[in-house]
Image: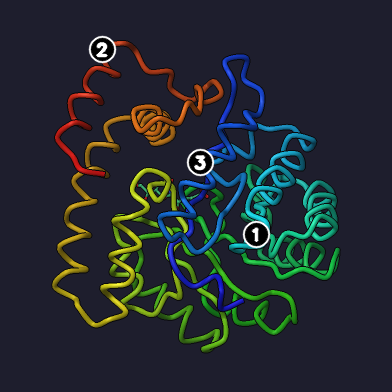
Amino acid sequence: LSRMNGIIPALITPYTNEGKLNKPVTRQLVRHLLSKGVAGFYLSGSTGEGFMQSIDERKAFLELVLSEVKGEAPVIAHIGAMDTATCVELTKHAAEVGADAVSAVAPFYYKHGLEQVKQHYLDIAGAADIPLIIYHFPAMTGVNASASFYKELAQVDNIVGVKFTSMNTFELQQLISACGEDFLVFNGPDEACLAGLTIGCCGAIGSTYNIMPGKFVELYNAFHSGDIAQARKLQYEVNEVIAELLNYDFIAFEREILRLQGFEVGEPRKPIQQLTDEQRRKIRDFAVKFDF
Ligand code: HMN
């Protein structure tokens, strides 16, 4: 599991012009990211548009990525869904096909109590013999679980970590402190990657590692070699891009940057923003000024 320490892109799902999974471009993107030194892949999360895909597509995409990665880096399948049964089905599948871990957001839309949320995670953890990384994303799920909630779940054998997508660094620190050294806590907001590492995250899972993998791997390495000045410089640099990204839907922006980098990953699924020609021009003009 320590293989998961490092920078892990929440992989964009490449589509064809017809909106189907794009196999050759997926292979091309995966190889490229591996060559940049990423520590793994996180599939079908927010960035991967997992919630806008059928169960069969999520399974097929996982199998596709595994067949290209061939054990060179860990592959984490986000199996989160509104209902427990879907999560259980996807977890069993992920274990069968050899994913390294699964991950799940809290069940969303309906307002469940924390007892129900806990049971949901216990059901997923019990579905198969595969590590589970809980995905903490209170802004989207409305589930505001605290350090003590995760401390309890961390006692379960195959619940191995949390991906923490929130800017609340105090809550992050409390979570790491409560769950202990062996528990894997991944930083969620890429714009605060260095902050997360400083607080004690073992790595980071995020969307902009698709478009700036090299910079973030360098940042991670600089941090670990004690060169904080260099790590900070890199964080400031990537944040210029993230500040621009925030003018758009992040998925639409990243797909466009990937296209400019030579990866024809296709359009995001509606209702995600479809860029106008004017917006594409603006992004292109921005991108030429920046060395990805
Ligand atoms: C995922 O599940 O796809 C991502 O890992 C989620 C990730 O934490 C992203 N968070 C959000 O989109 C809210 C970040 O990578 C984010 O896109 C980035 O920090 C830019 O704001």
Residue visible at 78% across and 38% down? Answer: 55
Where 48 falls versus 6 (above or below)?
Answer: above
Which quadrant holds residue 241? top left
Where 79 falls versus 281 (above or below)?
Answer: below
Q: Residues within 10 Å of mark 3 (few under 14, many from 20)?
A: many
Cα gap from disc 3 to disc 2, whole angstroms: 26 Å
Three-letter residue code for mark 3: Leu
Could you tell me which secondary element the residue under label 3 belongs to?
A: helix
- Residue where numbered disc 1 is placed: 103
- Residue where numbered disc 3 is placed: 29
Cα gap from disc 2 to disc 1, whole angstroms: 37 Å
Could you tell me which secondary element the residue under label 1 belongs to?
A: strand
Three-letter residue code for mark 2: Glu
Camera-side residue of 200 and 165: 200
Three-letter residue code for mark 1: Ser
Q: Residue 21: where, in percent of width, then height? A: 65, 29
Where 179 falls versus 191 (above or below)?
Answer: below
Label 3 vs 2, first from the N-terminus: 3
Q: Residue 149: where, in percent of width, then height? A: 60, 75
Q: Which mark is residue 215?
A: none
Q: Pointer 3 and pointer 2: residues touching (CB < 8 Å)?
A: no
